[in-house]
Structures are given as structure tokens and as C-alpha cells.
Amino acid sequence: MLDFLRKFLPKTDRPAPSAAGARGGFNYSGGPLFGPWDPSVHAAPGQYARFGRAAARPLSVFSKGGERTKVLDCDAKAGAVKVQGRLDRVYTVSLDRCTCPDFQERGLPCKHIYALAAFLGYTPADYWASWLDVACADGVIPRPASGYSNGVFRYDVRGVNPETGRKNKRTVSACGEEDAVAAAREIGLADPVEVLPLDMAAQNMHPVSERQKAFAAEYQVTFAPDFDEKDAGAVLSRYDREDATGIPVGLLQFVTGKRLRVSLLSSAWDLSFLLFEKLSPRDVLALYAASVRLFDAGSSLVDAPTDPVDAVCYAFSDASAGAEWASELSPRELLQPVKGSPAYRAARSFLRSHAG
């Protein structure tokens, strides 16, 4: 999994803070603010839960479920601290490693490492921005100018109605003004197409609700300051469903290509339900064909690094229009096709006959 994540993101060149700039005068050597780790490590399954627990409680009194973890010792030269964990066990923690069972088993940052990083000044904004670094690497998904959405907004456009020769005004969803012009042409407006000023107040963007804040406190979830309601909902859904999947980059690219606005923090589970609700049956069937192809190759939509849907998938969709089994597909089957089902057999047979 780490090799998959690292191919998206080079090592950060952000310098380490000086001893004078670090909180409490604590010092450590080398690496970025989060130590030697490539920031893409944060997108590994389950890391968001560890960071949330760490950021919800400062290191000096760090706890989970009422179990208090106190700093016992600080070795500034070595850049490590000793903390008292569960059952009065003592762990030695640095930004590189920890002696706790979680780190020893997984080799990934544990809650103690995250807590130490937070003590040194690492923030929720730093953490969640790392998800954007992975999701938006290589331009696969447009990087948002602000926040954590996939950059899809609503634009008012004006173009010529070919039937009447008059200018008509429409609203389209797009990833920028150039894409808004393309979207206007797709709905039948002819040139010249004019993109009107973007009214951010009309984007249906809402701040984090009080209810979401209450759930965040209960779950020990930490939001970045610029989260909106969609971002908060995406993260809370991961906690609520214990959805430990990483960033479904290919699925996010597919959703973005369909001009649906989503948070880049969304899980594959949430996206699968959105697609069933918002997209045409043709798009859903094409995505299902892509899912079957990945499934047979030992992968899934969760792990696809780019949009997995191609012309062959749409050819399957067109050939399957009206099939009885098509109406019985579920969002769950997009992520985990049911081997041997009528839909699976149809997709597998079609893909095999069109291979190459």
C-alpha cells in the first residue's frame, strides 16, 4: 500500500523548525515538520483515526476512552519522549518510530507519533492537505484553489439557442471557465458562449454544522479550519462506518469527469452511493464493467490510480441496456462485484470477448 501511495508524491522539501521555533523548545533533527515520513503515508488505511485521536488531546495529557497518557521524560538531543500508555506501559516516541505495539506491528505513524508531531506544531490543516497532495498529484484531479472539494462549481453561461437564434442563459457544473464553455456546448448552446461571473454564494457551500461538530467531539475527529459541510460529512462518514480505505483516486477522477462536486476526503463507499443517486444507468453500468475488470485482476475501484472507465466499458453498458439484472445492481456491487451473479457473468463475458 505504501508503494502505491509514494508513487504519487515526492518527498517534501519543507524544512524542519528550529529549536527556538518549536513548541516548548523541543528539538529534533532532519526531515520536514512531520519528521522523515513522506506525507502520503497519512492516506494509508486507518491513519486518519490515529491522527484524530492524537490531535484531539495534547501530548501532555493524551488519552483514548479515558486512559490517560502522560509525558514522563524528554530527551531533546535524541528528539524523543517517553509516554505512559495503556495499562501503565511506557513507550519511547520520536518522529521516526515508537515502541508501542501499533507501530511495531504496522511500521506506520501511531497516535503517539502524531501526538508528538502536534506538540511540535503539526496541524490538522497540514494533515488533511497531505490528502490533496496524493489525490491531486500529476494533475489527475484538479487541485482546488481552496478547501478540499474536487474543484467542481456551478457557472452561469449564456450562448445561442440554435433553434431560435437567441441567447439563452443556463447553469452548468464545471471545473473552471473553459470546462463551463464545453459543458454549455454539450447541453446544446452554440457559440459565442459567455461565462458569467462566478457567484460563490450560490455554490451551495455551507459551513460545518453544530451537529457535525458534536459528532467530531464524540469521535475525536479533528477538522481543518477550512472544512465545509461536505468535508466534515466525508470524514465523519469514514469514522461512522469504520471505512479505512485510502483515497480512491481513480473513482474521484471519474466523479470529477462527470462534473459532480465532492470532497476529496470522501471514501469509495460514499462515492458509490452518490453515483447511484446522481448518474445515469448508462454511466453506472460502465463503471460496473470497470469494477469487474479490476476485480478479475485482483484489484478494485478503491485502488485504481486513474479513471478506470473506457470505451469498452460504455460498449458493455450500451449492449446491456434493458437487461433484467441491470436494475438489480447495488452501490455495494460497484466496489465488490458478486462473483457468479448474472451481472458479473455478463460483464466478464463481454470484457473477455473485447479484450485487446
Image: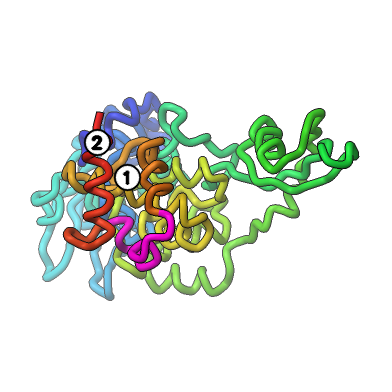
Q: Residue under circle 1?
A: 290
Identify the residue at image location x=15%, y=68%: 86
Identify the residue at image location x=23%, y=38%: 353
Image check: 256 left or right of 145? left
* Quarter of image, res 12: top left
The magenta region covers 321-336
Residue 186 placed where, x, y %? 66, 39
Residue 161 placed where, x, y %? 83, 40
Q: How is the image coloured?
A: rainbow
Along the line of sight, the residue nearer the viewer: 87 or 251: 251
Along the line of sight, the residue nearer the viewer: 32 or 312: 312
Identify the residue at image location x=10%, y=56%: 101
Q: Total label count?
A: 2
* Callout 1 amino acid: Ala
Magenta stretch containing residue 261, yes or no? no
- Disc 2 versus disc 1: distance between alpha carbons? 20 Å
Magenta stretch containing residue 331, yes or no? yes
Image check: 149 left or right of 60? right
Along the line of sight, the residue nearer the viewer: 90 or 46: 46
Magenta part, dominant SS: helix
Residue mark closest to the camera, 2 vs 1:
1
Element assignment for label 2: helix
Element assignment for label 1: helix
Residue 245 placed where, x, y %? 29, 53
Q: Residue under circle 2?
A: 4
Cβ–Cβ below 8 Å for labels 2 and 1? Answer: no
